[in-house]
Structures are given as structure tokens and as C-alpha cells.
């Protein structure tokens, strides 16, 4: 019993440490800006906001076969090096031999938030994508790293939703003289964002985060396009889009919410499947492939009889390498009754290709099971009928 409690607490400590790290992993804006179609992007300098008006949204020069379907506005741009500067001020920084690598990882830009706009330049608030990094920097500067506790960002996210809802409610439709489109009967005139509103949104995110980056950074507007011949669904871009109450999703991390769910499960006494990933294997279960025992394990797993029947249909030169096939066979054996199996490797070593082979194997195995059934109904669980009389189950 004591050992189980200690194991759960050890897992909680690991997850809480991972949880804090995720807050500081920035959204990489370079993946948006490093594109061949540079006509999709427009940099807006702070001084240009004073003269920004509705017509500026339509000044993108796009290919003739496309039309503008919307925009993405990236707010609160900052250099990622500012993250390292803040962390160096508030956290102990151990000496490292990989300083050049760390410095390279902090080059480039990130941002506070991304907001979707419709084709008229009107803001859509469901959802607004926000980075946890500026909030984490501001909170750490004010209250220390321990303040990044479970639930702290959730409360901050609700606060941000309230602030954005106030902004949405205070917006007034622009006069018709500034409208780029005729107004339909019964509909308010289009109300694209003005330069003052874009500036107000930038300040809203800065005040919410409690972190102010170096001044002078531009904003980024990305145009979204669709083919002209494609007919849009009815009401796909109606005037009600901007009326939805704001919701906030996370821009920079896929894992924060999942980590929180795992921590909650552990605190309630359950041991999630993730535990098999967090805890090291027992020494007697580890295999060094460069030993005699490792070579025997390779021979056993790579025996032709263990080959998976499902192979992704591709050219012969795209077949699995020795270690890819070893991982597939070992994974299929380990996951026979469920579980978690991790494969680590640097970028470009074939992890996604390996996953494709596993999908193909699952499809083939499922087809083999279905082929043995007498009728299609046998593929479904037995139906259970429940009868109610006078509101009670009988």
C-alpha cells in the first residue's frame, strides 16, 4: 500500500514537472513565415495601425483563380530569446555544454495569440488560440515558478474569455460609408477590425499575461484562400459568426490538458496508462541490442514467421529497415492485450512511416476477423433491450 502511494506521488511529481515545462515551449511563428507563397503574409508595423481601415484587408494580391476566404491575425509578436532572458533571471541556470544548441532553439519569433477573421475582416471569437508562454513568463516574474500550479492557467483562460467577451460586446458596427459590401436587409453592416481595435486587442493580451515584450514588433496578417469555383455552404460566412461567446484554446502545446487529466486521475487513485511511459523498465526487462542477449532478441523478433501481414502499398525501396521492422514486431507483441509502446528517434528516421505500417496491419487483422464471421450482425455486440414502465426500469 505504501509503495503504491509512493509510486503515484512519484508519477505526479514527474507530470507536474513536465506540466511546467510545457508552459514555456513557444509557438514557432517561423513555420508560418517560412513559406514560398509570401503573398499570403502581410507585416503590419505599429505606426501603420493609426491609418488602418477596412479596405486594407483586401489589398492582398492573390492568384486569379483564388478568392479570399478569411484571415489569421497573429498578435503580440516577440523574440523567443526573451523567454531565455526571463528564465535566466528567475530560475537557476546550470552550466551546459550545449549552449549553442540552446541559443539556436530560442532564435526566431513567437506570438501571444492567433485570431481568425472572416472574409470581411470581422473577428471570430470561437475559438481564439492563445500561447501559454507569455502568461507563464508574467506569472513567474510576479509570483515565482511554483505559481504555475494545476488549474492556474484554467482560471486565467476563463479570465481571458471574459475580457474578450467584453471587447466583443463593446464593438460597434462601422458606418455604411466605410463598408466594402452592400448591407443585406435585416443584417448589420460589416464591421472589420479597425487599427485602433487591433491595437486594443494587443494591449488586452499584454495586460492579461502580465508580460510586456520589447516594443516595436510588427503584427502578422495571413490571408486564407479558396478556389473560386468551389461553392460555399449556405451561411458559411454569415454575420452571426462573430457573435459566438469567446472560447480559448492553446496555441503552443498539445499536451498540457492531457497532462492535467493524468494528474487528476493519479490524485483520485487511478494509475493511467501513461505510467508505463513515465516509469523506467526494470533492469531485467531492458535489452542492449549490442550484447549476445540483444542479438538473440533481434533474431527472434525478425524471424520471417513474425512478419506483419499488413504492409503499406508502396515502392520496394520504401520497405522497413531492420530496426523499423524490429520495432513493429516488438510493438505488436507487446500490445497484444493493450498498453503503450514508445518508439523514439530523431527527425527523419522513419517513425511516421513505421506508424503507417501499424495502421495497415490493424486493418488487415480486422479484415481477417470480419471474414470469419457468418453474418454482418456478428460484428456487433449483442443488443440489450431495456423496458420502462411508469418511469421505472423493469
Image (spheres, rainbow, N blue to C red):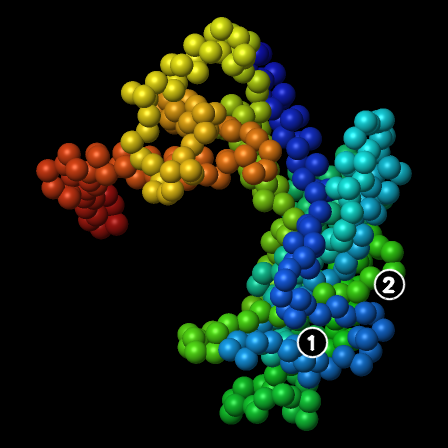
The answer, for residue 183, to whether it is visible in the render is yes
The answer, for residue 384, to whether it is visible in the render is no
Residue 388 locus on image (x, y percent)? 21, 47
Residue 258 locus on image (x, y percent)? 56, 39
| Residue 120 vertical placement versus 337 (above, below) | below
Question: Which label is found at residue 193?
Answer: 1
Residue lying at 76% horizontally and 60% vertically, measured from the top left: 76
Helix, strand or loop at label 1? It is loop
- Say few, some or many: other residues with alpha carbon within 10 Å of mark 2 (under 14 / 14 to 19 / 20 or more): few
Residue lying at 49% horizontally and 6% vertically, measured from the top left: 292
Tag 2–tag 1 contact (CB < 8 Å) = no
Residue lying at 65% horizontally and 80% vertically, measured from the top left: 58
Within the image, what quadrant is residue 193 found in?
A: bottom right
| Residue 351 vertical placement versus 235 (above, below) | above
- Say few, some or many: other residues with alpha carbon within 10 Å of mark 1 (under 14 / 14 to 19 / 20 or more): many
Question: Which label is found at residue 216?
Answer: 2
Q: Earlier in the sequence, mark 2 or mark 1?
A: 1
Helix, strand or loop at label 2? It is loop
Within the image, what quadrant is residue 268 found in?
A: top right
Residue lying at 32% horizontally and 29% vertically, measured from the top left: 308
Residue 253 locus on image (x, y percent)? 63, 45
Task: Please state which of residues 17 and 8 is positioned toward the viewer in this rendering.
Answer: 17
Amino acid at each position: 500500500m505504501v509503495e503504491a502511494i509512493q509510486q503515484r506521488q512519484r508519477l505526479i511529481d514527474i507530470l507536474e514537472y513536465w506540466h511546467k515545462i510545457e508552459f514555456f515551449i513557444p509557438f514557432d511563428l517561423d513555420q508560418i513565415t517560412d513559406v514560398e507563397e509570401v503573398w499570403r503574409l502581410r507585416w503590419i508595423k505599429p505606426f501603420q495601425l493609426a491609418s488602418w481601415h477596412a479596405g486594407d484587408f483586401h489589398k492582398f494580391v492573390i492568384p486569379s483563380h483564388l478568392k479570399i476566404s478569411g484571415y489569421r491575425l497573429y498578435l503580440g509578436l516577440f523574440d523567443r530569446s526573451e523567454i531565455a532572458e526571463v528564465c535566466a533571471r528567475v530560475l537557476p541556470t546550470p552550466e551546459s555544454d550545449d549552449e549553442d544548441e540552446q541559443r539556436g532553439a530560442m532564435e526566431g519569433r513567437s506570438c501571444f495569440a492567433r485570431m481568425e477573421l472572416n472574409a470581411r475582416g470581422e473577428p471570430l471569437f470561437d475559438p481564439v488560440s492563445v500561447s501559454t508562454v507569455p502568461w507563464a513568463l508574467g506569472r513567474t516574474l510576479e509570483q515565482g515558478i511554483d505559481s504555475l500550479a494545476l488549474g492556474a492557467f484554467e482560471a486565467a483562460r476563463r479570465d481571458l474569455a471574459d475580457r474578450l467577451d467584453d471587447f466583443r460586446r463593446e464593438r460597434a458596427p462601422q458606418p455604411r460609408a466605410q463598408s466594402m459590401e452592400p448591407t443585406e436587409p435585416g443584417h448589420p453592416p460589416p464591421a472589420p477590425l479597425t487599427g485602433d481595435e487591433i491595437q486594443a486587442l494587443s494591449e488586452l493580451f499584454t495586460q492579461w499575461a502580465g508580460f510586456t515584450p520589447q516594443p516595436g514588433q510588427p503584427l502578422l496578417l495571413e490571408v486564407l484562400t479558396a478556389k473560386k469555383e468551389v461553392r460555399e455552404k449556405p451561411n458559411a460566412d454569415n454575420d452571426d459568426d462573430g457573435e459566438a461567446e469567446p472560447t480559448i484554446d492553446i496555441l503552443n502545446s498539445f499536451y498540457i490538458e492531457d497532462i492535467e487529466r493524468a494528474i487528476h486521475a493519479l490524485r483520485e487513485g487511478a494509475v493511467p496508462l501513461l505510467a508505463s511511459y513515465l516509469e523506467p523498465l526494470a533492469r531485467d526487462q531492458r535489452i542492449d541490442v549490442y550484447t549476445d542477449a540483444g542479438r538473440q532478441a533481434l533474431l527472434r523478433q525478425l524471424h520471417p514467421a513474425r512478419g506483419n501481414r499488413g504492409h503499406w502499398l508502396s515502392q520496394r525501396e520504401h520497405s522497413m529497415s531492420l530496426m523499423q521492422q524490429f520495432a513493429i514486431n516488438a510493438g505488436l507483441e507487446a500490445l497484444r492485450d493493450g498498453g503503450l509502446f514508445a518508439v523514439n528517434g530523431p527527425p527523419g528516421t522513419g517513425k511516421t512511416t513505421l506508424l503507417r505500417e501499424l495502421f495497415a496491419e490493424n486493418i488487415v487483422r480486422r479484415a481477417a476477423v470480419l471474414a470469419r464471421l457468418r453474418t454482418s450482425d456478428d460484428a456487433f455486440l449483442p443488443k440489450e433491450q431495456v423496458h420502462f414502465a411508469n418511469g421505472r426500469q423493469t
